[in-house]
Amino acid sequence: MSSTVYSDQLSVEHLLGIKDLTKEDIELIFRTADGFKEVLNRPIKKVPSLRDITIANLFFESSTRTRVSFELAERRLSADVVNFSSSGSSVSKGETLVDTVNNILAMKVDMVVMRHPDPGAALFLSRHVDARIVNAGDGTHEHPTQALLDAYSIREKLGKVKGVKVLIVGDVLHSRVALSNIFCLHKLGAEVMLSGPNTLMPRHIESLGVKVEQDLDKALRWCDVANMLRIQLERQGGDGVANFPSLREYAMRYGLDLERYKRIGKEIVIMHPGPINRGVEVTSQVADHANSIILDQVENGVAIRMAVLYLLAARIPRPTV
Amino acid sequence: MQPIPILTSKAFGLTVGRLCYQLIEDHADLNGVALIGLQPRGILLARRLRKELQRIIGKEVLEYGELDITFHRDDFRHRSTLAAPSATQLDFMLDGRKVVLVDDVLFTGRTIRAGLDALLAFGRPASVQLLVLIDRRFSRELPIQPDYVGKWVDSIGDERVTVEWAESDGKDQVLLHPSERDSRDASTLAHGNSPDR
């Protein structure tokens, strides 16, 4: 007992986006995730830290991986978990977001993990309800835990993030993963380049300090890590105009197959936030390649989310009764 | 006020040696014994014991592990600071093993309680014993008592006991840091291998 090592706490009360985090926050999350990663390899993968915390998972948009990952993280921290998805609920009867959440909080919930189709929904919620908010994706804005687990997976595979050259390919326009990744990688000292069709590249994206390279082959030769974003089919053509002629043409110009991978002439790490459209962003041979860390990303996701929930919970004052 | 040395280099070595012989006395060939050090400071004693036992017996006979208890602590959200996790290295199941849990200083007993909790995630040991270098008796907050003790120290209130290791601190020694108000003689505070005076 004599000399427990103490660390700082997070500088934020909610995890709304990577933009609000400091480099020290991110490093603290990574160190804590290291501990949880070890816990996840134990025969009994459960610790009692959050046994007096109740967490509501509110998913107003479909999700498999993120929802399962958060729920596993919560249960392995011994939190009580309630799940809520918008289909077949009071939301479809016209209830507002604040009303929905306040009704759930009236049942004594301490933290809310929310995915929502509208950018800024998590921030809005944090201003209007008395609970800690974790943003699990708000529209095309941010997806902070995904960026954290991506950077953590790079750190695990390459031993560092600083100075690593990361290429993000594809549907940057609709991607909350891309924006959170850019913030996170820059804070950790990595370089970021984007590649993809002009129509899927937000205007003035260079103002975030990233390079843009239209030619995927050139971009691949530059990078150490390629993060192949999912084409968000559900968000394409929202304005009635298609962003690219066909999936086949997209796959030919911006998809990564084994032949293109071999042409790079060096080993690069392949990432994908999932779910993969096999044969569009990457072919099966690349997705299942030895240098692909796609499944490591999923595994690390649980440890990162445990770390985030644990560190946010640490800042919830205990009731003084 | 200057810290009072309780164990210095030579006595320190003798004490660690005695603890090894006590383990051998109780467990004969040490078959089925798992020595598990508690992070962050108990591992330094555990590593030393492991090395010393290996030297005495002439071969590696123990299972050895290091356990972090951070996520099992009972003071999460009770204090403004946050304990930082260390690494756990435990790559064997504990089922049927005779576990000797090792820490440097036993004080309130809360770390050991958390250690027992963490330990059970790795199986069901046949038995668990506790070995500590320093037992700060009279300060317990939980009904936990050690099976092997290097030295008993009667300390109170805001006094602190620190264990320093040649490997990490440059010198083997145990120091008592008195409170500002107190000026007792070290000889009345520490006792050898018997809890009775």
Image: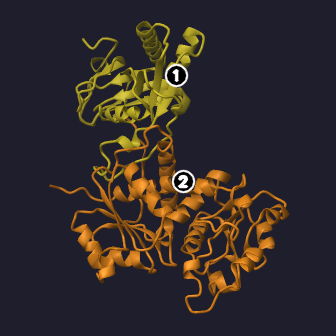
Instruction: Tell me which chain appears yellow.
Output: B
For mark 1, name the chain: B
Residue at the extreme left of the image, as rendered:
A321
Density class for disc 1 (Cα within 10 Å; few <14, some 14-19, many ≥20) is: many
> Which picture quadrant has residue A165?
bottom right
Could you say where residue A278 lies in the image, as x and y percent from the top left? 67, 66
Instruction: Tell me which chain appears orange.
Output: A
> Which picture quadrant has residue B22?
top left
What type is the residue that disc 1 sits on?
Glu
Left or right, B37 with reference to B184: right
Q: From this view, report whether residue A48 is shown above or below residue A104.
A: above
Residue at x 41% of width, y 27% of height: B104
For mark 2, name the chain: A
Residue at x 77% of width, y 68% of height: A220
Residue that mark 1 sits on: B63
Density class for disc 2 (Cα within 10 Å; few <14, some 14-19, many ≥20) is: many
> Quarter holding the C terminus of chain B?
top left
What type is the residue that disc 2 sits on?
Asn
Could you say where residue B167 lies in the image, as x and y percent from the top left? 55, 29
Q: Does the rendering let one see residue A270?
A: yes
SS for callout 2: helix
Could you say where residue A216 lies in the image, as x and y percent from the top left? 77, 74
Left or right, A122 with reference to B90: left
Could you say where residue A80 lies in the image, as x and y percent from the top left? 31, 54
Residue that mark 2 sits on: A300
**How many tags in the picture?**
2
Q: Does the rendering let one see residue A96?
A: no
Nearer-the-camera pick, A273 or A240: A240
In three-dimensional space, the C-alpha distance between marks 2 and 1, rounded to whole angstroms, equals: 29 Å
